[in-house]
Image: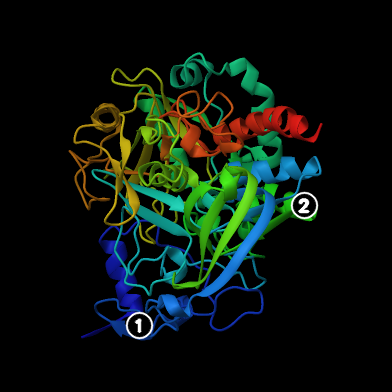
Amino acid sequence: MKIKRRDLLRLSATAGAGALAARCSPPAGPADSGVDSGTDSGVNGMDASMDASMDASSEASDDVRSTPDAMVRDGGTVMTRVLIIGSGFGGAVTALRLAERGISSVILERGKRWPLTTMYNTFATLLLPDRRSTWLSESTVLPFGPVFRIPKYIGVLERVRGNGINIYAGAAVGGGSVVYGGFVVTPRESAFQRAFGTRIQYADMMPYYERARQKLRASRIPADILAHRSFDAERVWRTQAERAGVGWTEVDLSVDWDVIRREIAGTVPESALTGEVIYGNNNGCKLSLDRTYLADAEATGMCRIETQHLVKDVTTGPGGNGYAVHVDVIDTSGNPVERKVFVCEYLFLAAGTYGTTNLLVKAKAKGLLPRLDNNVGQGFGNNGNAMFMRWNVGTTTGPNQASFAGQAIADFSNPISAALVEHAQFPSGVECNCLLHLGMTLDVGRGHFTYDSATDASVINWPAGTGDISVRAMQNLADRLNMANGGSLNGSSVGVTVNGILSDFTYHPLGGMVIGEATDDYGRVNNYNKLYVIDGAMMPRSAGGVNPALTITALAERNIERIIRDDFAAADA
């Protein structure tokens, strides 16, 4: 049986397939920019038939067969004084601030670069996701909408399955900044202190929040952009919150608003206006780290990024000095083609909450870093994430719900747990009369990591009921909104839900190497010199009821300032 792509799109929209309305075509052929050429024919090929199973095997792809060990090249040993694992928020901050002090570094990044092109075709689209969308999976992995079969590839979004929870992470130069929603939110003082306790004072963080905001170009949506019809859902969102007696607020984003103005003027292809965000934005409206911190770090000539370098293990260096980092250099299908060992004096772990904690849990379990203590792998949290869809909200919400509106419900008086709840756009391409809500509660359950020797990987354990407080808080909010405005949680599901609330996932995994517990108050790993954690793994289980990106960035600014002053200055004296 064959179906037309245009019929597939119609079926997907009717079924409530969220975030599927992009109009920007993927590339029709090879590009000289370094963008992978093995992609679908895209929107322009909607009339081309495809197998009903959504098998994308006709897409050009690399050989996905495993590589025999005998064919994997020996890349030898690479010596460097400073090594950074990961190019997300913490790694990017670290590289830039070291470079500004004349300290060179090497960044190991498992993903690839995704340079923007004049064809506006760097990333996959939500409408027709291809292999660029997903990290080493044979299907797309979003927690909502239809599942598409795709060839295995080193795409931008990874899902890590745990026991009771799935987490999502970026896999690219720029890490999570490539796939996040652009939210850079400063928490309230009371919420910050609730999350961090007394070990870090909110007032002391203010200069670092401001430093991070400036570099990320944080700002709120301008009124002229918000007035565009693609943001109709935001006006409904705000009106219905007010009608229910719930507070709302605008929050900051890391966005180039002039690009979105050009979308509105029709001089660049639409991206934000059609709800693109999670696979990247082809016209450059989202200011990912490869255009801010990392660009500035590389411009100094003091930072080198090694892409498609997948770290397997970390151990002590030769003679017990420094650290040895064992790396597989992978092809675009994830197969190892070369093995290297990087030996360094200073090692910064910035591979994201799962990536960093996984490496250290493995190192402890395998005796590679035997002095790691029992705080390693503890204190994992989901930042209070819970999601729900309100259907039949009593008015039109628009077929194209735009990205980057920065509107949020400030439900700080929720009787279950204070929460910030953002509008997660749902641009299905047809009128859905619906609003998708992503909540972040202040109160968060506690999970932990364990090592699985069969897979040589760590597993996140999230026991049944751990996320109940977030579910109950979102249920309370949904009931108030529906009572005041109409609407229901019944309808095409956004995933596996409990009473209409989805909570077995997180876009904001935090913890595992919590600051002040598994490390000192500046991210120095307990019992080891010159070994640092400087990413989401150092966060407590909650970022204070807001998106964590800005706080991770600000903490990294704070920590690397102290580390340069005390650890490097002392060594160089």
Q: Position of residue 512 (x, y in %)?
A: 41, 35
User: How far across and down, in percent of the image, does residue 528 sit?
Assistant: 54, 34
Q: Which mark is residue 243?
A: none
The structure residue drawn at horizontal position 40% and vertical position 44%, both measured from the top left corner, is: 367
Query: In this rendering, would 389 be left or right of 464?
Result: right
Residue 202, quarter of the rendered image: top right
Q: Amino acid at mark 2?
A: Met
In the displayed structure image, the side of residue 413 where residue 100 appears, left or right:
right
Q: Is residue 336 left or right of residue 489?
A: right
Task: Give the colouring mode of the picture.
Answer: rainbow
| 317 with respect to 481 (left or right) | right
Provide the secondary structure element on which disc 1 rests: loop
Residue drawn where x is 35% and y is 64% of the image: 140
Dot 1: few (<14), some (14–19), or many (≥20) neighbours within 10 Å?
Answer: few
Residue of label 2: 302
The foreground one among 418 and 220 is 418
- Residue 197: image location, x then y, percent: 47, 16
Decide: is 174 above or below 479: below
Is residue 360 shown to the viewer in this render?
Answer: yes
User: Which quadrant does the C terminus fall into?
Assistant: top right
Which quadrant holds the N terminus?
Answer: bottom left
Disc 1 designates what residue? 57
Quarter assignment of residue 259: bottom right
Q: Nearer the viewer, residue 246 or 510?
A: 510
Q: Earlier in the sequence, mark 1 or mark 2?
A: 1
Residue type, mark 1 in image: Ser
Report helix, strand or loop for mark 2: loop
| Residue at image coords 56%, 44% | 320
